[in-house]
Amino acid sequence: MNVNDIKGKTVALAASGGLDSCTISRWLTDQNVKVLSITGDIGQPDETNIEDIKGRMLAAGAIDAILVDLKEELAETAITMLAAGARYEGGYWNTTGIARYVTTRGLLQEMKKHGVDVLVHGATGRGNDQVRFQLVANMLNPKVTVYAPWRDDAFLENFGGRREMIAFCEARQIPITATQDKPYSTDSNFLGLTHEAGKLESLDVASDFIEPGMGVFPKDAPDKEESFTVRLEKGCPVEINGESVDSLSALLKANEAGGRNGIGIGIHAVENRFVGIKSRGVYESPGLCLLWECYEFILQQILDRRARRFYDRASHALAEQIYQGYYYDLASQMMRQSLQPVVNLLTGTVTVRLYKGNVTFDTSEGVTHSLYSEENASMEAIGDFDHRDSEGFLNVLGVSARANHPAGQIEKSLLDGLI
């Protein structure tokens, strides 16, 4: 699809209010396209006043600018992702990825209200977000058409990158926040910040080159431990430090505690984009990183070795599904449902200590479905485990162990001087 296909029509622009959104809105308006700006309020930390986005988009030519509150839905979706342990390569918590699903769904709902069937986004043709916007729209409403300016020759002939876009907006007095000197770009929501491009594309630039937006680097955190307690019930945080919480407030409180102690700030990843190229990102996700450590301490108590292996495989697979744009498809539904028995067992209270980027286990209690028995694990003569029972166990294991040697399956260098 190119711009000629939508001239004279009204389109819905997935607007962040940033440089790309403002440029695309003004350019499309100049091409006789009516732009309805729709922004998902996903708790963007870099927006002092989310209402400012509406003003920027109207100044950029939009016929109207709509703000849709999606914070609660994003929080609930994030808790599902968290309970599944769905991190992508390098420890990236898919903060931008999972937000695209919630945002696109919210946009489609708003588009239906206004009778608009063309979705426009400003995602680059080299990245993952174009895949997420497209596939989510295709899955949820196949009648919607997606137009991506960054894949249109007409747009690319005018804009090679940030420099041309900034000049374009400045010439038209559009109140953008981007400058020619900004050394990298940031995508934000309350789950985390994604920093990439610009100087970060060079691996000569350290991960602490960024200016943290959700906390401080570990080296700058207080030289004092902080206690943090969370109560989970069936995979959902219900109390933090003795105060009742829902999914949204739990994540916000964890962001505050994790951020000021340097948890999850400056995560470095050179990851595999879905389009087949390597990409370098520096991430911030203090709340998710902190809460995950607490989830992990309960998982260690409730999962046996076979369940743990399955859980880890499903976590990895679901993280890839989220990253690549398939979170709503059948495979992802199957993965989430397969992990539901684990989620149902994730109940308990964990207290950890936070110190300069580290999360240290303190105590756990009320883990209803824990397999851990202090008596059976003890080296003392207590509990139901009889040391003598291991004699027969080891004799059975020894049958296959002894068979390795005569079969020639042991490295010869290990046998020198033994027999």
Image (cartoon, rainbow, N blue to C red):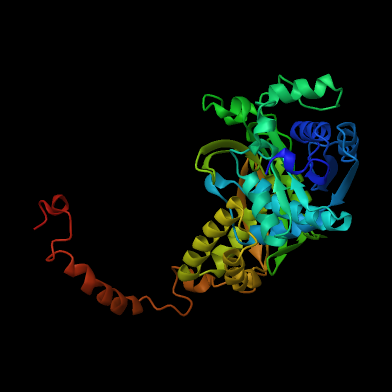
Count of residue discs = 0
Image quarter in which the N terminus is found: top right
Q: Is residue 332 left or right of residue 222?
A: left
Q: Is residue 236 left or right of residue 174?
A: left
Rendering coords of residue 32 (x, y %): 83, 36
Rendering coords of residue 150 (x, y %): 66, 36
Q: From this viewpoint, is residue 412 visible?
A: yes
Q: Quadrant of residue 23?
A: top right
Q: Nearer the viewer, residue 239 or 119?
A: 119
Rendering coords of residue 4 (x, y %): 73, 39
Q: From this viewpoint, is residue 222 visible?
A: no
Q: What residue lies at 56% left-to-right and 67% top-to-bottom?
A: 301
240, above or below 233, in the image: above
Q: What residue lies at 57% left-to-right and 55% top-to-bottom?
A: 319
Image quarter in which the C terminus is found: bottom left
Q: Is residue 47 left or right of residue 277?
A: right
Q: Quadrant of residue 235?
A: bottom right
227, above or below 109, in the image: above
Q: Nearer the viewer, residue 368 or 235?
A: 235
Q: Nearer the viewer, residue 330 or 376?
A: 330
Q: What residue lies at 17% left-to-right and 61% top-to-bottom?
A: 409
Q: Nearer the viewer, residue 130 or 53?
A: 130
Rendering coords of residue 3 (x, y %): 73, 38
Q: What residue lies at 77% left-to-right and 43% top-to-bottom?
A: 6
